[in-house]
Amino acid sequence: MTATVIDGRMVARGVREETARRAAALTTAPVLATVLVGDDPASGVYVANKRRSAAAAGIGDVHRHLPGTASEAEVAAVLDELAADDRVTGILLQLPLPGHLDPARLVERIPPEKDVDGLTTRSQGLLARGEPGLRPCTPAGVIALLDAAGIGLAGRRAVVVGRSTLVGRPMAQLLLGRDATVTIAHSRTRDLPALTRSADVLVAAAGVPGIITGAHVAPGATVVDVGIHRTSDGLVGDVDRAGVAPVAGAITPVPGGVGPMTIAMLLANTVAAAQTREAAR
Ligand code: NAP
């Protein structure tokens, strides 16, 4: 068997087109505010991509770039100004922040209705309770990919490798919300291969290149690779694709799998936030 490759670029394009249609149907255009602190080149590229994709979907742009020396009070003041700005429907604080700033404390200043990254305590609490709210983009993108590929989740066994606030935990909650039977693995998990071989759907988000090998995968399982690592051979994921492809039923590639979905879901969240606001008026 050779696994079917799930094309994230194609699915992401569909999400972006649908988002642009929904944005155009709104009375007032949605606006995404991006906040970048410092001059980390990778963060700069990520923010530029998000702004470009937002503009292409008909989403307005507000951008604040603060120096890497900005104090927590200064960053907080910018977030507060954007929170109070009625034009702004979504706020994204690009992470990681310079080491002297507390990301959790700053993220909390984003009102839940503008929390398009889904990272505030309130958004994550709503997710944990199974109540409506804005969902973290990468795990939401994984669900959209699985749906587009026709992978059923209800009653299936899902294993998520990783328990971060950004990916692993919300991923597990979203799978649970879709009635999968979910297990979370982490760095203290014993006998990871035995556990992951029990999965119908395996999501790798450990941040360890190639940690998931053919020995970790049950024949015919769906394997989603969230990992992104820059190497001299280009981008690779957490999944050893050459070893896993002959065993799995379906697999997401790196690059071109989960990565393109993350920005697409950010745009979808920004438009969803604007729709919710418009419906409340
Ligand atoms: P993270 O905060 O470093 O979390 C990694 C998680 O994996 C932790 O929970 C850790 O366990 C667990 N882990 C580490 N080594 C392990 C091992 N040997 N066995 C089992 N579990 C292990 O990383 P993250 O922010 O969740 O990101 C994970 C990966 O996804 C990274 O490669 C990142 O670049 C990528 N990513 C991609 C996108 C995208 O758009 N595609 C978006 C976000 C992140 P402990 O909790 O026990 O330490």
Image (tube, helix red, strand yellow):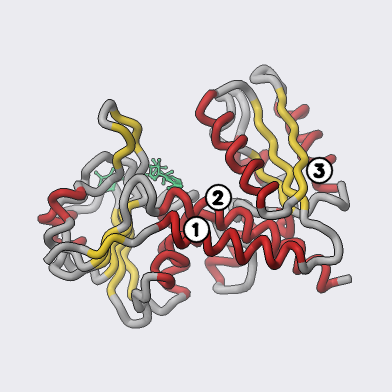
List x then y, in percent, for residue 11: 46, 62
Secondary structure beneath dot 1 equals: helix
Where is mark 3, residue-wise? Answer: 82
Camera-near label (2 vs 3) is: 2
Camera-near label (1 vs 3) is: 1
Question: Label 2 near label 1: C-beta < 8 Å?
Answer: yes
Question: What amino acid type is highlighted by mark number 3?
Answer: Leu
Q: On residue 230, which mark appears? A: none
C-alpha span from label 1 to label 3: 28 Å
C-alpha span from label 1 to label 2: 8 Å
Secondary structure beneath dot 2 equals: helix
Question: What amino acid type is highlighted by mark number 2?
Answer: Ile
| Image-quarter location of ligand 1 | top left
Where is mark 1, residue-wise? Answer: 12
Q: Quadrant of residue 233?
A: top left
Q: Of all residues shown, which one is farthest toward the top?
A: 69
Determine whether the beta carbon of the residue marked 1 sits less than 8 angstroms from the nearest atom of ligand 1: no
List x then y, in percent, for residue 77: 81, 34
Question: Label 3 near label 2: C-beta < 8 Å?
Answer: no
Give the residue at x 28% y 60%: 5
Give the residue at x 41% y 57%: 8
User: Can you say which quadrant of the picture contains the C terminus?
Assistant: bottom right
Crowd band around label 3 with a 10 angstrom C-alpha radius: few (<14), some (14–19), many (20+)? many
Crowd band around label 2 with a 10 angstrom C-alpha radius: few (<14), some (14–19), many (20+)? many
Where is mark 2, residue-wise? Answer: 263
Question: Label 3 near label 1: C-beta < 8 Å?
Answer: no
C-alpha span from label 2 to label 3: 21 Å
List x then y, in percent, for residue 184: 33, 60
Mark 1 / mark 3, whichever is N-terminal: 1
Determine whether the beta carbon of the residue marked 2 sits less than 8 angstroms from the nearest atom of ligand 1: yes
239 sits to left or right of 68: left
60 sits to left or right of 191: right
